[in-house]
Image (tube, rainbow, N blue to C red):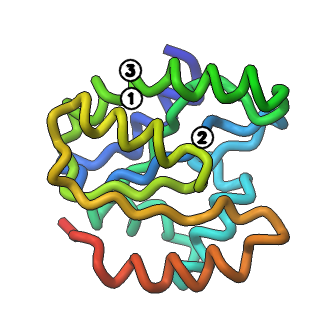
Amino acid sequence: MNDLENLRLSFRPHRITTLFVGESPPHGGTFFYRKDSLLYHKKRESFDAGAAFLSEFKAKGFYLDDLVLCPINQMEEEIRNKRRWKGASSLALRIADYRPAAVVALMIAIKPMVWHAICTAHLSQLPLYVVPFPRPEHQKRFKTEMAEIIQMLPIA
């Protein structure tokens, strides 16, 4: 297990109520659980949280995993899509282990792969919410949709 996955694991709640799924760790070396990624900053804003955001995130039973555990965001779209589909089988195993009460896909393009993983884990009754990744052109929509979704999420 690499350093990023060890760091991610240190934030895993005892009971995962809501699983957030990103595409992959960013190519540039930032990471949600290092508190230095775009996703970290935009999710923290969405939750209207302070410096203790990650502790509060964990305490609510929230956990962020990725569809693919190595960076793919700089790859050509065709290769990237193949990697996404390949990642769905390992995500399915993790979802079966986590047994969350809800899942939030943090990128519209990964919705079919995340849904496939949920169904493969025999958890098709789970609600799946989807928001766009908070790139600059989608930040307003991300914030608006996250605000709506947060109110519906199960909390530990």
List the residue tagged with mark 1.
Answer: 91
Q: Who is closer to the viewer here, 22 or 38?
A: 22
The tag earlier along the polypeptide, 3 or 2, is: 2
Q: How many marks?
A: 3
User: Mark 1 vs mark 2: which is more N-terminal?
Assistant: 2
- Callouts 3 and 1 close, C-beta under 8 Å: yes
Which is more toward the observer, 42 or 145? Answer: 145
The CA distance from mark 3 to mark 2 is: 14 Å
What SS does tag 2 mark?
Answer: loop
Badges 3 and 2: C-beta atoms under 8 Å apart? Answer: no
Which amino acid, by three-letter code, is at mark 3?
Ser
Residue with the mark numbered 2: 23
Q: Secondary structure at mark 3?
A: helix
26 and 145: which is toward the camera = 145
Asked if residue 49 shows in the view, the reply is: no
Q: Picture coordinates of residue 84 (x, y %)?
A: 58, 28
> Callout 1: few (<14), some (14-19), or many (20+) C-alpha neighbours within 10 Å?
many
Q: Amino acid at mark 1?
A: Leu
Residue 11 shows in the view: yes
Image coords of residue 39 (percent x, y): 66, 58
Neighbor class of circle 2 (other Cα within 10 Å; few <14, some 14-19, many 20+) is many
